[in-house]
Amino acid sequence: MEAAPLLEVNNIEVVYNDVILVLRGLSLKVPQGQIVALLGANGAGKSTTLKAISGLLKTEEGEVTRGEIRFACERIDGIDPHMIVRRGIFQVMEGRRIVADMTCLENLRLGAFTRTDNEVKSDIDRVYGYFPRLRERTGLAGYLSGGEQQMLAIGRALMARPKLILMDEPSMGLSPLLVKEVFAIIRRLNEELGITILLVEQNARMALSIASYAYVMEQGKVVLDGTAEALADNEDVKEFYLGGHGAERKSFKNLKSYKRRKRWL
């Protein structure tokens, strides 16, 4: 029998302000110990998917109105965000969301706010092992470069000792060199610490280079999924997400050759 995935999102709908339907029967699975990428154009519903999993929809007047979300075989939709963190899920938000008027060290300690053990100091040293530049930055976090702030945001997530990290656009606003550095660290965290990662990323080429599986979203639904290798070789994915050279992206629904998946509908 196939093992149950660590995270399973089953046919969820998300509504904002009791009116705006954003997710329209979305389903996906994230196996233990893997990196899964979630791709799609702006407005497809990728960030909303992460917020539904981490319980943050309420902060934006949103709610899951249908379907269910299971983590480690237990249902988590509807419980408070701090309880979801305690269960082992931590979200690295789009735009970093570090506390600018706190130091790097204080930001890292903030990541461990749900913990009651006495090993916080050793975990801070472990974060510095992955991000040595943070050890050198003793001033306020608001003065860090964009790349250093992203490192701090990921380091803060590690302080919660997560089983699953939800990463929302980690390459946003970074130079190509820093993007490669950040993605190399994400791969290391997965390989060395065994942390499962659900990655939302506009840079589809980089995302597929480190992921084992990927989903493509449009208009609140998954319209295509497969191994990262298969999607990287898919001609439609190449046209829409891996090439284009600045050309306007089309939609999968306009392809005569594209057949919409049936199993989630």
Image (cartoon, rainbow, N blue to C red):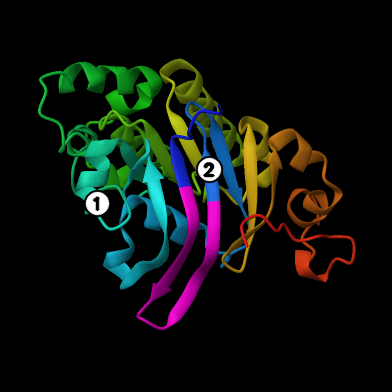
Residue 250 appears in the picture as rendered = no
Residue 80 appears in the picture as rendered = yes
The residue carrying mark 1 is 81
Please indicate whether residue 173 sits to the left or right of residue 57 in the image: right
Separation of residues labelled 1 and 2 (CA atoms): 20 Å
Whether the residues at callouts 1 and 2 have beta carbons within 8 Å, the answer is no
Q: Quadrant of residue 227?
A: top right
The residue carrying mark 2 is 29
Dot placed on the residue nearer the N-terminal end, 1 or 2: 2
Q: Which residues are magenta?
A: 9-27
Q: Name the quadrant of the N terminus.
A: top right
How packed mark 1 is, by other alpha carbons closer than 10 Å (few <14, some 14-19, many 20 or more), is many
Q: How many marks do you count on the picture?
A: 2
Residue 263 horizontal/vertical position (percent): 66, 54
Residue 91 horizontal/vertical position (percent): 36, 45
Q: Name the quadrant of the C terminus.
A: bottom right
Please indicate whether residue 59 sits to the left or right of residue 206 in the image: left
**Residue under the point 62% across and 31% down:** 210
Task: Find the residue positioned furthest to the bottom.
Answer: 19
Q: Secondary structure at mark 1?
A: helix
- Circle 2: residue type: Lys
**Residue under the point 54% across and 64% down:** 25
Q: Nearer the viewer, residue 247 or 100?
A: 247
Residue 20 lies in the magenta-colored region: yes
- Circle 1: residue type: Pro
Residue 13 lies in the magenta-colored region: yes
Task: Find the residue positioned furthest to the right.
Answer: 257
Q: Nearer the viewer, residue 188 or 180?
A: 188
Asked if residue 89 is positioned above or below residue 44 in the image, the reply reads: above
